[in-house]
């Protein structure tokens, strides 16, 4: 079958879909008078306008939305903030310009984060040797796991909850480290609760059982792992907790607002200083946060009031999100520190990156302060070098 001849200006290439016999365009780009419209449930695909109502009754997205309706662990929007929605606010270059001196002033009150890149012996002696070239993910996993070990998060009767788990690679190596510790009997080995709203190919779930047999000759090791496909905002975590166990919340690169939803999810559960044995979350994508769902708006409102800012909370938060992207968007090939380009701020790229890291820190400090107010010890740490990951800050929480 021939390829569609429609040229996509945005992508600089022809459409990759095939055509029906006797036509030169696919159904999406057809010149037919019949019109295709985006699906209201998922704009990533389109349908014939005349068939829209029929499609809505059987769209896979609809089935996914109601996948957990009858489950005890599902409660719609349980971990959303619940306050009235903020009005839609367009990006404002002037707001960003007004926010820059304020970001610099707020940042001055924080101590510089120290680099605490740790190494786990097992990850160094086993996992690293399996990788011929790109070891960046393994280096991050090694450091995060050792932060958990040093923070006392390993021990008997632990259940690790990995939020935004994806393929559950981090949990798999946590499991391997636990199996090799040698100070736990079979009844004390950790369990894993895997949370992700997406369907993930090449999952590591089966590997948990394989590792248990290969490392410790334990059968039915896979039974200690349960995966739940659900949005964190709808997760009623209390329904998944077991008496007599201690819990550790973990994640590697928990994106944007998902970190705030996770903290609120833990708050809404029955976990406390006695049963929550730690949190280790490598955060990312602050530019994808949500001022509505941010866990500690009062922290930012106090900063604005103390500095007599003319920006309100909503506009300041949107400006922070914009600046956060400057820290992680990467440079074009050949770009120098002093290059400004046509950027609306007139600032060189190295200064924009610095401001991005400052904005990111302000958002993270609000999260850390919110947890401290709950009675926990909290540290923000650079857990790897920046050349390993631009998103290199982790939130490490231990009970007092």
Image: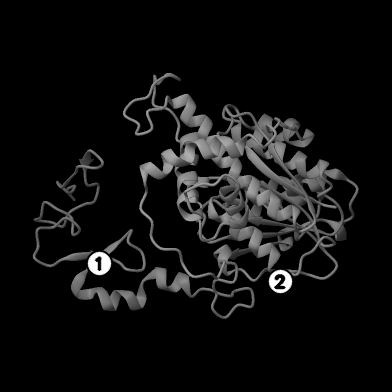
Drawn side of residue 289 relative to residue 116, left or right: left
Q: How many marks?
A: 2
Measuring from the top left, give residue 300's x and y in whole percent: 58, 51
Q: Residues within 10 Å of mark 1 (few under 14, many from 20)?
A: some
Q: Closer to the observer: label 2 or label 1?
A: 2
Sequence-wise first label, 2 or 1: 1
Q: Which residue is mark 2?
A: 238
Q: Which residue is mark 1?
A: 47
| Placement of 356 over or under 238, stated as above or below | above
Q: Name which residue lies at 85% across and 67% down.
A: 244
**Circle 2 SS class:** helix
| Placement of 271 over or under 201, stated as above or below | below
Measuring from the top left, give residue 29's x and y in whole percent: 16, 55
Cβ atoms under marks 2 and 1 closer than 8 Å: no
362 vs 337, nearest the viewer? 362
Mark 2 and mark 1: Cα distance apart in space: 40 Å
Residue furthest to the bottom in view is 70
| Placement of 47 over or under 279, stated as above or below | below
Q: Could one spot residue 269 in this view of the protein?
A: yes
Measuring from the top left, give residue 304's x and y in whole percent: 56, 49
In the picture, residue 55 is in which quadrant? bottom left
**Circle 1 SS class:** strand
Q: Name which residue lies at 32% across and 68% down.
A: 40
Measuring from the top left, give residue 81's x and y in whole percent: 57, 66
Q: Which mark is residue 124?
A: none
């Amino acid at each position: 079958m021939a390829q569609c001849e429609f040229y996509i200006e945005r992508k600089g290439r022809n459409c990759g879909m095939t055509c029906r016999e006797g036509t030169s365009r696919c159904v999406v780009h057809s010149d037919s008078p019949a019109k295709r419209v985006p699906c209201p449930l998922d704009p990533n695909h389109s349908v014939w306008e005349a068939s829209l109502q029929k499609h809505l009754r059987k769209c896979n997205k609809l089935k996914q939305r109601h996948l957990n309706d009858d489950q005890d662990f599902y409660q719609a929007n349980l971990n959303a903030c619940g306050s009235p929605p903020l009005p839609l606010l367009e990006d404002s270059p002037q707001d960003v310009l007004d926010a820059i001196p304020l970001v610099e002033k707020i940042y001055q009150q924080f101590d510089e984060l120290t680099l605490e890149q740790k190494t786990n012996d097992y990850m160094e002696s086993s996992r690293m040797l399996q990788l011929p070239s790109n070891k960046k993910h393994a280096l991050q996993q090694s450091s995060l796991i050792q932060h958990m070990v040093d923070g006392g998060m390993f021990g008997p009767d632990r259940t690790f909850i990995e939020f935004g788990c994806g393929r559950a690679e981090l949990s798999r190596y946590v499991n391997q480290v636990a199996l090799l510790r040698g100070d736990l009997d079979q009844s004390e080995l950790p369990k894993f609760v895997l949370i992700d709203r997406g369907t993930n190919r090449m999952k590591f779930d089966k590997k948990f059982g394989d590792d248990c047999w290969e490392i410790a000759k334990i059968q039915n090791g896979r039974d200690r792992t349960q995966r739940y496909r659900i949005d964190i905002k709808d997760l009623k975590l209390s329904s998944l907790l077991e008496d007599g166990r201690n819990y550790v919340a973990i994640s590697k690169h928990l994106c944007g607002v998902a970190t705030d939803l996770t903290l609120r999810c833990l708050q809404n559960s029955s976990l406390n200083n006695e049963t929550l044995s730690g949190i280790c979350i490598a955060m990312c994508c602050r530019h994808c946060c949500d001022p509505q769902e941010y866990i500690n708006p009062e922290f930012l409102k106090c900063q604005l009031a103390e500095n007599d800012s003319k920006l309100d909370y909503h506009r300041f938060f949107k400006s922070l999100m914009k600046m956060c992207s400057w820290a992680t968007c990467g440079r074009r090939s050949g770009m120098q520190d002093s290059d400004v380009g046509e950027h609306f701020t007139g600032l060189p790229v190295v200064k924009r990156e610095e401001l991005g890291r400052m904005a990111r820190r302000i958002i993270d400090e609000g999260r850390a302060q919110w947890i401290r107010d709950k009675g926990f010890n909290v540290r923000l740490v650079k857990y790897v070098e920046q050349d390993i990951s631009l998103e290199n800050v982790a939130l490490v929480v231990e009970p007092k």
